[in-house]
Image: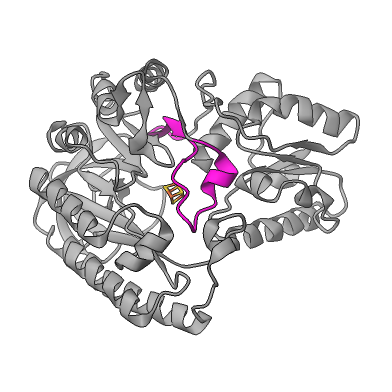
Amino acid sequence: MNEYDSELVKSILTGAGYEFVADAALADIVMLNTCSVRENAHRKVFGNIHEIRHARKGRSVAIGILGCMATALRKDLLEDKSLALDFVVGPDSYKRLPDILRSVTEDHTQGYDATLSEFETYADVYPSRTDGVNAWVAVMRGCNNFCSFCIVPFTRGRERSRSLNSIVEEVRRLAAEGFPQVTLLGQNVNSYHDSGHDFAALLEAVSRIEGIRRIRFTSPHPKDFPDSLVEVLAHNPKVCKQVHLPLQAGNDRVLDLMRRNYTSADFMQLVGRLRKACPGLALSTDVIVGFPTETDAEFADTMRVMREVRFDTAFMFKYSVREHTRAARELPDDVPEAAKTERIVALNMQQTDISLECNKALVGQVQSVLVEQGSGSRKGAAAYARNDANKVVALVSGQFVPGQFVDARIIRATPHQLKAEPTVS
Ligand code: SF4
């Protein structure tokens, strides 16, 4: 979502006459588009600001923070003397950036707008994209779920969907520009709704656009999978057979404390429905270990559910307290750091074995892969592509350009990558 938002900002500012340079050392204004989901994201940003100032060796530069940190920390950021920020702008205020930057550079005042909107979807801004293979398209913004650990509803505001027509128009334009793949984005993407059109209807509408060959989406919530969506996933050939399905925890008491609105049995049932309708479906997930009050036995339930589902990949995190959230207010962060580390190591080891087994099962198959990095772009393979399941596939021979579809036989597997020989080069 932040990559997409950076493309929106670039479009808004180039429209106002600003020129973008890739190297922060050459810029007069530097903006960091930030994430607040985990605590170490904040630390990284603070480190970056100090590095940028150091690299400038005293030459003046205006530095600002955009995105979730702006709405999470608000004026505290501007008041922090060690950061010496010039502006702080939240995710719903990017259209105000030209005015804010003018006052920062001309009047030398600090700029600030971290207001959250119930309506802003940026449907009228066409993002300035650089990648020619995949285009991110935000179809909704914000979230109403208030999972107890998550800061997103506080940093990105309430859920609002774009009109189906505006999305279809944007994707038509992308297809005309040659993008073969779009990824539909939203904090709770499958709760999309616009005048009677649900997310399944949106996928169908986007799939009818000529030139678009692959459609992905992220991140769905397990509670929003009506039969119509499972049906589209199973039968629409343009919709990739891959779903990122955040589990978060495998124990029902912990899931309840997390306010996830499903039990582990509900989750397993959904996985069963998806796999029955769509055999071979690739699944990935997010998991948090060491949630407040989680016991060893409850963590063992997460290990068990992960073994039962056999996700292709998983993003695993230690719980960290996020200000404003219900967990921060009501639950003690009482799982010792050592126990969190032990749990994440165990989960990682188990998942690495499962990912390797899932990938090894593909050896010998011929798959259609979409080249993302062409021949010669980096060492180690002739080109890098992704299969329908979104797995990285290193092509071992041939000459390919980004955007090309190639049939390739999988010849080797590691937990995180496949190697494949093109069947025709
Ligand atoms: S659904 Fe996702 S974005 Fe929304 S509150 Fe829960 S974890 Fe956060």
Q: Specify whether residue 393 is in view.
A: no
Locate the C terminus by quadrant.
Answer: top left
Residue visible at 27% across and 66% down in the picture? 415
Residue 363 position (above or below residue 118): below
Q: Residue 139 at what x, y percent from top left?
A: 41, 29
Mark yes or no: residue 278 visible.
yes
In the rendered structure, does residue 35 fall within the stretch colored magenta? no
- Residue 350 in percent (x, y) is at 27, 75
Asked if the stretch drawn in magenta spans residue 146, the answer is: yes
How many marks the image carries: the answer is 0
Q: Residue at x 41, y 53 (%)?
A: 378
Instruction: Identify whether 377 is placed above or below 82.
Output: above
Please tell me in which quadrant of the rendered image residue 258 appears.
bottom left
- Residue 39 percent across, percent down from the top left: 59, 62
The answer to whether 419 appears left or right of 362 in the picture is right
Residue 62: image quadrant is top right
Front residue of 124/156: it is 156
Residue at 69 percent across and 42 percent down: it is 31
Which residue occupies the foreground of this view, 277 or 335? Answer: 335
Q: Residue at x 11, y 48 (%)?
A: 366
Q: Which residues are magenta?
A: 131-158
Residue 4: % across, % down = 50, 36
